Each structure stands twice: as structure tokens, then as C-alpha cells.
Image: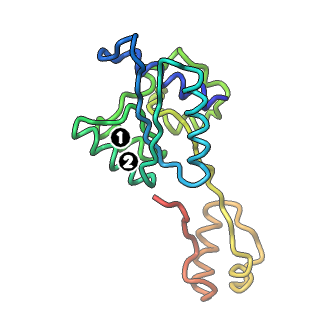
Amino acid sequence: MLKKSIIILTLVTLFAFSAAMVSAQTIELEFWHAMSGGRTAAVEKIVDGFNAEHDDINVTAQFTGSYAETLTQGISAVRSGNPPHIIQVYEVGTQTMLDSEAIVPVYEIAEGKIDFGSVIQPILNYYSVDGHLYSMPFNSSTAMLYYNKDAFAEAGIAAVPETWADIEEMGLQIINSGAANHGLSFGWPA
């Protein structure tokens, strides 16, 4: 429900500030996103629900590739003068968009207009600078840490890492023992 409210607020505020829009016409908004596979269907469901509730607004969702591809296309579209009205950018892409002056910060159009009380504070913090929300959380990811019990056993490590220092130390033990080529790796696709 919060995601739907956030999208509605974003859409409403975007068209409210556009001088080119005429109230008698249907407002067409382009929304670029990076949600592939089953996530595309989830985005389409949200957009279809919004469109069904707003006869005077039509949002068209367009899958534009991976997070990195969508970010690159968004910046290129801004530079060419033909950006989408809304673009979904992954967490770390927010700073790139700010540095490229490619976005209007959320706080400039939404502060005081929506209650973010149900959003987990660390997620809001991730998208905020000096207490101002710059990018709207949409599908924040949760990092997971897994460890390979077999590699730990082969390296002679019985304990489970509890701190980052443990991870570093045990990772080096795993490498030095020959149990694995890497003591730590990230599966985060950028």
C-alpha cells in the first residue's frame, strides 16, 4: 500500500508542477524501470491499478534493462532533453543521478505531503542527505550473508563469523588453507 501511495504522490506532484499540461487532456507519464521477470508483472499491476483509479492520468511503464542500463539511459535521456517523467534507479545510483543533476529531489516536491512513518528508518536514511529525502524508496534490497560450511570445515574453522573482523580473518584462513580461492565475494549485480 505504501508503494502505491508513493507512486501516486510522485505522479501527482510531477504533473502538478508541469506548465505544459492542460486539465482537459489525459496526462501521459512515462515510467522507466529495471524490474525484470516476475517483478515486471508487479510493476505493471501497480501502474494498472493507478491508471484505473485516475481517468485523467495514464502511466506507461517501460522496462529499460538492468539497473545500470536504466541509470545510463536515464542520464542520456536527461542530457538529450527527453527524459522520462519517472525513473527507477537502484540505491547507489541515486548519488549518480544527483551528481548528474538529472533528478528533482523528492523532498522538494513531497515533504509534508506523505507520511513515511511505515518505511523502515534505515531505508529512508539510505536515500537521504542532511535529513532530506532525495530519492523515493521503491524496492530496497536486503543484503544477505551466507557462508560455505564446507570451506570453513576444510580450512579447520569451527566457529561462525560474528563480526566483520571475523569475516576478514576467517576469509584469509580459508584462502591460506587452499579451501577456496576467495574468502569473501559479493553477488551484487551492479
SS at mark 2? helix
The crowding category of the residue bearing disc 1, from other C-alpha atoms within 10 Å (few below 14, some 14 to 19, many at least 20), is: many
Q: Residue at x 35, y 12 (%)?
A: 22
Where residue 135 appears, as percent x and y from the top left, is 46, 34
Where residue 142 appears, as percent x and y from the top left, is 63, 50
- Residue plotted at (54% across, 24% down): 8
Dividing the picture into quadrants, the one containing residue 1 is top right
The answer to whether residue 108 is seen in the rendering is: no
Task: Name, please, the residue furthest toward the bottom.
Answer: 178
Q: Marks 1 and 2: in contact by CB < 8 Å? A: yes
Question: Earlier along the polypeptide chain: callout 2 or callout 1?
Answer: 2
Residue nearest the observer in this picture, 88 or 174:
88
Q: Name the residue furthest left.
A: 80
Quadrant of image for the C terminus: bottom left
Q: Is residue 41 above or below residue 136?
A: below
Residue in the foreground of this view, choosing between 148 and 44: 44
Mark 2: which amino acid? Answer: Leu
Cα distance between the residues tagged 2 and 1: 8 Å
| Residue found at x 47% / y 22% | 57
- Quadrant housing residue 162: bottom right
- Res 2 → quadrant: top right
The image shows residue 181, relative to residue 32, as above or below, that is: below
Residue type at the position of mark 1? Met
- Please tell me whether mark 1 sits on a helix, a strand or a loop: helix
Q: Nearer the viewer, residue 8 or 91?
A: 8
Image location of residue 136, percent across then percent down: 50, 33
Give the numbered dot on residue 131.
none
The residue wearing badge 1 is: 97
What percent of the width, then of the height, locates residue 68?
A: 40, 54
Kindly tell me whether residue 125 is visible in this rendering.
yes
Residue under numbered circle 2 = 71
